[in-house]
Every structure is written in structure tokens, then in C-alpha cells.
Amino acid sequence: MSPYALVMIMWRDDLPRWEQIVRVIGQRVESGLYPPGRRITERDLIEEFGVAKVTVRKAMAGLRDRGYVYTRPNLGSFVGPDPDAD
């Protein structure tokens, strides 16, 4: 279970939930709470935020687009920066 699973999320009505998840995880990355190389799983995000898999997948895409995470096939997603990026 995620250590954040018991935190109640107060959802905003003016932003999609996936975007709100991106902002929360982004803040954790920027603050150092999630250090580079830390694994982030869809299951943990689904459990923590109580959202559908499709919402988490949109959030993961947003996190990748913003450079917060990178994904390796068959290994998972990790906090960036991507060590193999140019």
C-alpha cells in the first residue's frame, strides 16, 4: 500500500483529475520527496488517488511529457531525469 493511500484528495472541479495528479506528483518530484530513479507504478497511483486506470495512464503521459518520469518497457516508470536522454 502506498504511504499516501490514506490522504484524502480534495478534487478541483476546474481541472481534469489526471492533470491534478500530474501536479501532485510533480510537486513531490520538485520537492525531492520523490528522488530520481524512484519507481512509480500505475497500481500505486490508482490506489492512492482512487481513480480509474485510464485516468492514471493520462497522468503518466502528462508526467512523461513534462519530464517528471520516464518509462522503460518491461521495467516500469521512474522519476526523471531519464539517464539515457540526449
Image (cartoon, grey):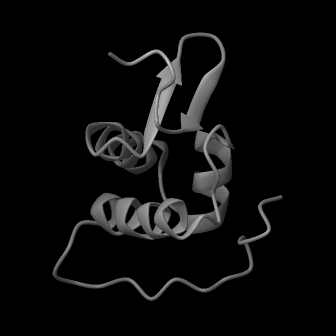
Asked if 85 appears above or below 8 in the picture, the reply is above
Asked if 83 appears above or below 27 in the picture, the reply is above
Q: Is residue 69 left or right of residue 40?
A: left
Q: Residue furthest right?
A: 1
From the viewer's side, name the closer residue of 10 and 27: 27
Q: x, y (%) of residue 66? A: 28, 46
From the viewer's side, name the closer residue of 51 and 67: 67
Asked if 45 appears above or below 9 in the picture, the reply is above
Asked if 11 appears above or below 38 in the picture, the reply is below
Residue located 34% across and 69% down the image: 20
Displayed quadrant of residue 45: bottom right
Residue located 63% across and 10% down the image: 74
Q: x, y (%) of residue 69? A: 46, 39
Displayed quadrant of residue 38: top right
Residue located 53% across and 70% down the image: 31
Q: Quadrant location of the N terminus?
A: bottom right
Displayed quadrant of residue 47: bottom right
Q: Is residue 15 left or right of residue 22?
A: left
Q: x, y (%) of residue 83? A: 51, 23
Residue located 61% across and 44% down the image: 36
Q: x, y (%) of residue 35? A: 64, 52
Q: Is residue 32 left or right of residue 60?
A: right
From the viewer's side, name the closer residue of 20 and 30: 30
